[in-house]
Image (tube, grey):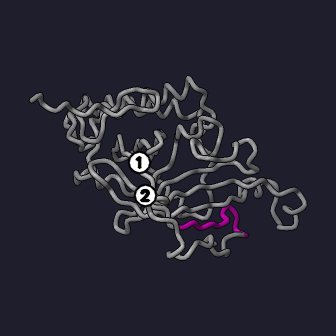
Amino acid sequence: MPAPSSPAPASSSNGRRRPVGGSAGDGGGDGSGMSLGSTDLQRRVEKLKSQLLVMLSSLDRGLAANAREADEVDRLAVMLEEMGGGVDLANTESAAQLPGTWRLVYTSGFNGGSLGGRRPGPPAALVPTTLGQVYQVIDEAAGKLDNVVELLLPLPTALPRMLMGLSAQSAMRDSPAARLTLRHDYEVQGRATVQIVFEDTSAELIGSDIFRDLPRFDVPSLPDALKPPRFLRAGKFEVTFLDSAMRVTRGDREELRIYIRDTQGAVSKQMPPPDYDD
């Protein structure tokens, strides 16, 4: 009887081979991220991360990326995934790196100029707001994962600014924004797969002292008995690279996302962070 064949490596959205969590790669395949023991390897990883961030700095999370640039980002991401040697979230060191606040710096879902990516969504050019920062906040102890989206609202006209007692300079600095928080439960499945289940949404206005005392608004949700089944509210993504500063994921619809760890605590502040610039 012939021996069973090994499973084929997973492929990225453009057909490139990439490692599954824990598969062997240049990094040794032990799934423990940057504890791979090779100083030379760590230097190469850091150099590749810097190269990737430079590439992303002008792409506005992917909204400004053309097909050639999107392919180049994917190529660099595949190299980083292979060099990292796979992720094993059962490994204590890797698991400890997953929680925290992560800022989205790229998603292939924006390449088509739609805020919905492969999912139905409005054309970005027709939305009367500017997309601000996008975060993912992971709370391991509570088993919660929040996707936080900030939408910069149009600046008020000169008359409302005067009525609010704001100078033009102050209005520019304190431009209003809406912050939407999409709350999910999450659990790790297998070595590197994360399943999320949508629970509810909240909204708040930020960016100016006039909003400071306004409460957060929870979008009404259906009673538990009327909510769609969990499997209809669930999604999965695979963590394909993870260290203390960067995380790369591949979604269940082949969406590539790249995050960097937020060290400014911007999500917890009333003021929105500066316009995207890496």
Mark number, residue 87: none
Q: Name, please, the residue furthest toward the right.
A: 159
Residue 8, quarter of the rendered image: top left
| Image x and y of residue 146, in percent | 49, 60
State the residue at coordinates (19%, 37%).
37
Q: Secondary structure at mark 1?
A: strand
| Image x and y of residue 100, in percent | 41, 57
| Image x and y of residue 171, in percent | 77, 57
- Classed neighbour count for the residue bearing mark 2: other residues with Cα under 10 Å, few (<14), some (14–19), many (≥20): many
Q: Is residue 166 magenta?
A: no
Instruction: Report the Cα–Cα distance between label 2 and label 1.
Output: 8 Å
How many discs mark residues in the rendered view? 2
In the drawing, does residue 80 fall left or right of residue 68?
left
Q: Is residue 207 magenta?
A: yes
- Classed neighbour count for the residue bearing mark 1: other residues with Cα under 10 Å, few (<14), some (14–19), many (≥20): many
Q: Which residue is mark 2?
A: 196
Vertical arrangement, residue 207 with respect to residue 111, above or below:
below
* Start-end of magenta stretch: 200-210
- Looking at the rendering, in which quadrant would you find the N terminus? top left
Q: Name, please, the residue furthest toward the front.
A: 1
Report the front residue among 169 and 126: 126
Residue 16, quarter of the rendered image: top left
| Image x and y of residue 53, in percent | 48, 34
Q: Which residue is mark 1?
A: 237
- Looking at the rendering, in which quadrant would you find the C terminus? top right
Residue type highlighted by circle 2: Ile
In the drawing, does residue 161 fall left or right of residue 252?
right
State the residue at coordinates (55%, 57%).
148
Residues marked 2 and 1 touching at CB (< 8 Å): yes
